[in-house]
Image (cartoon, helix red, strand yellow):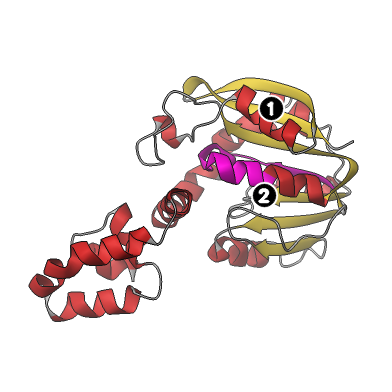
Amino acid sequence: MEQEIKDVHIFSFPFIVAVRNEKAGEVVSRLKNDRKEFYAGLDKLLVDELHLMSRIDYEREICAIAHIDSMDQYFEIAESEGALEFFWADGGICRELFGRLDLQNTVELACGRGRHVPRYINDAGHITLVDILEKNIDLCRMRFSGADKISYVVNNGYDLSALPDDHYTSLFTYDSMVHFELLDISNYLKETYRILRPGGKALFHHSNNDSDYKASYDDAVESRSFMSKSIFAYLAYRAGFEIEEQRIVDWVKPEIDCLTLVVKR
């Protein structure tokens, strides 16, 4: 469907958000039959559909669609040794904080196509990979088809409802939560607290960009969501966690991201 829409030169975030539901078939049909007549009714269709979405839903959809549209190119770069070095280089801050996680039963949130898994699979007892995009999870299933220690979950982008209470020893997420909506992050923190065992830890790579609270994925600095080191600590504490450590880090721009390690007591 996305390709058909691109072909008529009206691909835009608001348009795709508006039609990625039960209206999609109607829209594509009208595009094929009569463009002029379609354009005449487009504004009303967009207003009707976008009115049904909250601003949080809209921003979440924008982020997901952006990753769908550029997914192959992104993951080709993300799988490179240079891109992975930030997270796994010996002596690096990510490697240091990750080393404090108990990997007996760990969750990787927003796992993408599983680029990090080979770096820790031999140290893990069991791994649960979670992602909002079904295609990513399908590719992970194929990639790690020979590993019986991995489970797979497609979630909705704001909770971990498929995962049981007090069950996991750790959770981490890299290079994804930097784009998540603040309210979704708050929900994920509460969900993470719910699923971790007492003593379990979670490592979050998140945005440290609080320059513009109105910014969206498509116009924020490096597409970073509105978040800061202090705001994240507040949300984590309110969710029940103790903050073990926070480190502000550079990512293209100086001090734009933060790593936060929390523990459930």
Based on the picture, tell me whether residue 172 belongs to the magenta stretch: yes
Tell me if residue 85 can be seen. no
- In the image, 192 versus 152, the foreground residue is 192
Q: Position of residue 234 (x, y in %)?
A: 68, 28
The residue to which callout 1 is attached is 233
Q: Mark 2 falls on what kind of element? A: strand
In the picture, residue 152 is in which quadrant?
A: bottom right
The residue to which callout 2 is attached is 109
Please determine whether, in this image, residue 82 is positioned above or below residue 167.
above
Frontmost of labels 1 and 2 is 1
Which region of the structure is painted magenta?
A: 169-188
Q: Is residue 9 left or right of residue 91?
A: left
Circle on res. 148: none
Q: Mark 1 falls on what kind of element? A: helix
Q: Earlier in the sequence, mark 1 or mark 2?
A: 2
Amino acid type shown at disc 2:
Leu
Q: Position of residue 133 (x, y in %)?
A: 55, 61
Tell me if residue 37 can be seen. yes
Q: Position of residue 38 (x, y in %)?
A: 15, 72
Quadrant assignment for the C terminus: top right
Amino acid type shown at disc 1:
Ala
Q: Residues within 10 Å of mark 1 (few under 14, many from 20)?
A: some
Q: Is residue 179 left or right of residue 38?
A: right
- In the image, 118 versus 239, the foreground residue is 239
Please determine whether, in this image, residue 236 is positioned above or below residue 121.
above
Q: Residues within 10 Å of mark 2 (few under 14, many from 20)?
A: many
